[in-house]
Each structure stands twice: as structure tokens, then as C-alpha cells.
Image (cartoon, rainbow, N blue to C red):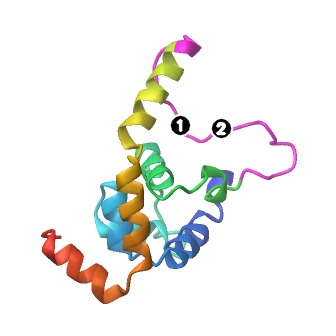
Amino acid sequence: MRYLQTFNRRLRQMREAGRLSCQDVAEICGVEEAQVISWEASDGRQRTYPDISALLDFCIKTETPLEELLDLAEPGTFGQFELPGLAFSNSDDLSSALDELDQEISRVQLSDEEAKLLRRFRKTTAENRRLILQILGG
């Protein structure tokens, strides 16, 4: 999977730069924390990869361009996007597939208020984040 060769390092760097824990990323992606830990595993034999919906959830909810997580800049691949399992539709009709993709993006798109809360949450201290999650029952 050439598009995911450095995914684990890129995800960890983005997570740390955004001051997010593995649990935070797990909640954003709707998965267990153990899955996020395995996405970041340095040992390729222990590493797993997110499915497309978790990947889109992360990108949209953190306002991260997909190309920052994936190795898309290989010579000869400009304009190509062939991730295994990257299918939003079983239809051969492009407009139908694009409609389904639009629905999936709308499902995970943050409202302006949610985006503002997420930015504020990221900027606060680790202790404040812990207290907020505790209040929310997380």
C-alpha cells in the first residue's frame, strides 16, 4: 500500500501537533483507542490502517487535508488516487457515486460551532481537556 507507507508517522505528528491523545483521535474517528495505537505502530507487522470512513472523519473533523496523511506525491501518480478499499458506491454511475460521497462528507462535516469548540478544546491544557471529557462522561 504505497499510499500508506508513512501514514503512521504522519498521523502521530499531526496528532501531537494538534495536542490530541490517541483517545481523542479514537473518539473523532469512532473507533477504539487500541486501533489508533495500531495505526501509529512503528513495527509494520503490528500496524493496521483505518477504513475510509475513519480516515474521512479524522480529516474533516480536524480540518486536515487528506494528502497530508497519505503518500500521494510519488512520481507518476499525480492525479491518481487508488487507495485499496476507497469505494463509496457499488454503482458504475459516476454521478451516483459522487452523490454518495457528498452524503458521507455531509455526515461527518463539523458545524461552525463544532469546529470552534474543537479548536478551543485543542488549545486548552491537557488538564482542562481531561476535565472537559470527564464532565462529558468520556
Identified at 56% across, 40% down, the residue is: 84
**Which quadrant of the structure image shows residue 50?**
bottom left
Residue 37 can be seen in this image: no
Q: Position of residue 90 (x, y in %)?
A: 45, 19
Location of the C terminus (image quadrant): bottom left
Q: Is residue 41 left or right of residue 114?
A: right
Query: Mark 1: which amino acid?
Result: Leu
Q: Which residue is mark 1?
A: 86
Answer yes or no: do the residues labelled 1 and 2 have beta carbons within 8 Å? yes
Q: Which residues are magenta?
A: 72-95
Q: Position of residue 54 (x, y in %)?
A: 41, 50
Q: Report the label total.
A: 2
Identified at 61% across, 59% down, the residue is: 69
Q: Is residue 4 above or below residue 85?
A: below
Q: Nearer the viewer, residue 131 or 101?
A: 131
- In the picture, the disc for residue 82 is 2
Q: Is residue 80 above or below residue 114?
A: above
Q: Position of residue 30 (x, y in %)?
A: 30, 54
